[in-house]
Image (cartoon, rainbow, N blue to C red):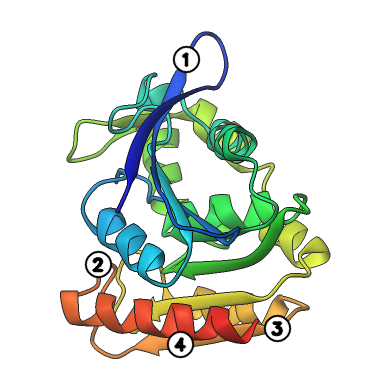
Amino acid sequence: MTETDYRIAVADGEAVAAVHHEAPGDDWIVYCHGFLSDKTGSYERRCRRAVERGYNAVRFDFRGRGESDGRFVDQTLSDKLADLRAVLEHFAPPSVVLFGSSFGGKVAFHAAADDERVAAVATRAPVTYNRAFDDYREIVEREGECEFDTGDRIDERFFEDFETYEFDDVTASLSVPVAIFHGSDDDSVAVDDSFEAAAALETDVLLETFATEGHRFSTDAEDRLLERLFHWLETQ
């Protein structure tokens, strides 16, 4: 299995770190990690499983995370969308499946809404409606910034940009098939948000809940998710 590291130019002299897991053929899947995550761990397993199913797979770090340039506090949703676009332009797949986990799901949804290369969107515990970040917003309004356990921070710049991306924009324009996988006991992103999003989308949607799973899936649930993901993709 061939895995090749890349540094892909984005803007202002900065670059993102990406890994291409190569497979024969023209099927591609690009993984978008969560807010405080990076491209390691579960994304390595997801990419290797994708290759086994015949997909070229790409995992990358958004700026401010992992091996990519930039400071986390300076990054907005617009910046993450720019990072994803740069990755897609670098590899230039004829079509691509986007898989987004948590905040990466929000990135994937908004990217797919206006990119004709995207053939399907799959998500795990996605951030859809902006209310999922209301607690962080209140902290920023009160204290000027919100610092996480990792030491990473966001400030008012993040929310000024974030508020320009409503899920209604996605529902109005997204036409490709969507899969949503969500733990029933998620206490970070409410599973009810995924039910509401699935009902609002005007396209084919698969929504599956995983009993007793939280925001982070167990190894067993992750394995079942991947089986369901690639079975679903085979039907599209």
Q: Which mark is residue 14?
A: 1
Rendered image quadrant of residue 183:
bottom left
On screen, 186 above or below 160? Answer: below
Q: State which tag comes first along the sequence, 1 or 4.
A: 1
Circle 1: residue type? Glu
Pick whichever, 25 or 77, lies toward us: 25
The residue indicated by pointer 2 is 216
Which tag, 3 or 2, sits closer to the chain's start?
A: 3
Q: Earlier in the sequence, mark 4 or mark 2?
A: 4
Crowd band around label 1 with a 10 angstrom C-alpha radius: few (<14), some (14–19), many (20+): few
Q: Mark 1 or mark 4: which is in front?
A: 1
* Residues under numbered marks 1 and 4 in contact, where contact means CB atoms less than 8 Å apart: no
Q: What residue type is labelled 3?
A: Asp
Q: Please name the residue that numbered disc 4 is placed on.
A: 208
Quadrant hosting residue 16: top left
User: Mark 1 to mark 3: distance in Å?
Assistant: 37 Å
Percent position of residue 177, x then y: 68, 75
| Left or right of residue 109, residue 15 in this image | left
Query: Residue 172, how many percent across, how many down?
Result: 82, 64
